[in-house]
Every structure is written in structure tokens, then in C-alpha cells.
Amino acid sequence: MHEGVRKYPTVVRGALKVNGVGVGFDAEARAEIIMAQVKAQEDKLKVLERLTPLLGRQAAELYGRFACKPSTTFNHQARGNEPSISRDALVPGYRLITSMPMVWSVVLCVEVR
């Protein structure tokens, strides 16, 4: 039979990443998952910017538009969370997009119109 102290499961109030979106009760933990996505996107664009002289401007532009497009990731995060959670986390992502005139200038002009 069972001897000793009973062990109960530990409940952790955090967030899990399901299909790339934070799910859970803790809003801060879900915002951290979004911030991790923004940081990963920032790293991708920094690598692309460093490779631009090697690839050429046209190839870098195409890679930036089709492979490193942040709006896909950010839209997925924004739709999967309440605006109160995703808004503060996605502001740096928006600044990241607007600070990259080399890759995103044409995309932003099309979206504004």
C-alpha cells in the first residue's frame, strides 16, 4: 500500500504555446510569448540586412517580402489574443517594420492606400 506523504499535482499558472499563440490564464506570460515572436522577427530582419550586400538589393527585397514577412506572424498573434494583451507586445514589432525602409517601404505604402 501507499505509505508516507500524499503528493498532489502542482498547478502552474502560466501560458502554453499552442499553434504559435499563447494560451493560458496569465496575461503577462502570453505577452512574453508574443514578445519572443517579435524578437525572432527582429533577428531575421537583422540577418537579412547584413546579407543584403552579398545577395543584392533585389534578392534581399524578395526574401524580405516572401520569407521574412512579419505581418503574417503578427496577425496570427493579434488574432489569437485579446487586444489588451497583444497591443503592448506588438508595438515594438510595428516599429521594427517601419524602421526597415529597405525591405518594407513598398509594402507599407500599399497598406496605407
Image: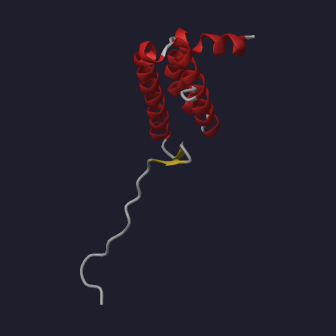
Q: Front-most of 23 and 99?
A: 99
12 is higher (above) or lower (below) than 66: below
Image quarter (top left, top right, bottom left or bottom right) of the C terminus = top right
Whole-percent x, y for residue 46 in the image: 42, 20
Q: Front-most of 105 and 48?
A: 48
Q: Residue at x 55, y 33 (%)?
A: 85
Q: In the image, 109: left or right of 30?
A: right
Whole-percent x, y for residue 111 in the image: 70, 16
Whole-percent x, y for residue 104 in the image: 58, 15
Based on the displayed image, in which of its 4 quarters is residue 90 positioned?
Answer: top right
42 is higher (above) or lower (below) than 95: below
Image quarter (top left, top right, bottom left or bottom right) of the N terminus = bottom left
Q: Residue at x 26, y 76 (%)?
A: 5
Q: How are the colours assigned in the image?
A: secondary structure
Q: Residue at x 50, y 34 (%)?
A: 34
Q: Front-most of 87 and 47?
A: 47
Q: Report the residue that reaches farthest toward the right.
A: 113
Whole-percent x, y for residue 40 in the image: 44, 31
Q: Report the residue that reaches farthest toward the left.
A: 4
Q: Report the residue that reaches farthest toward the bottom.
A: 1
73 is higher (above) or lower (below) than 52: below
The mark total stands at: 0
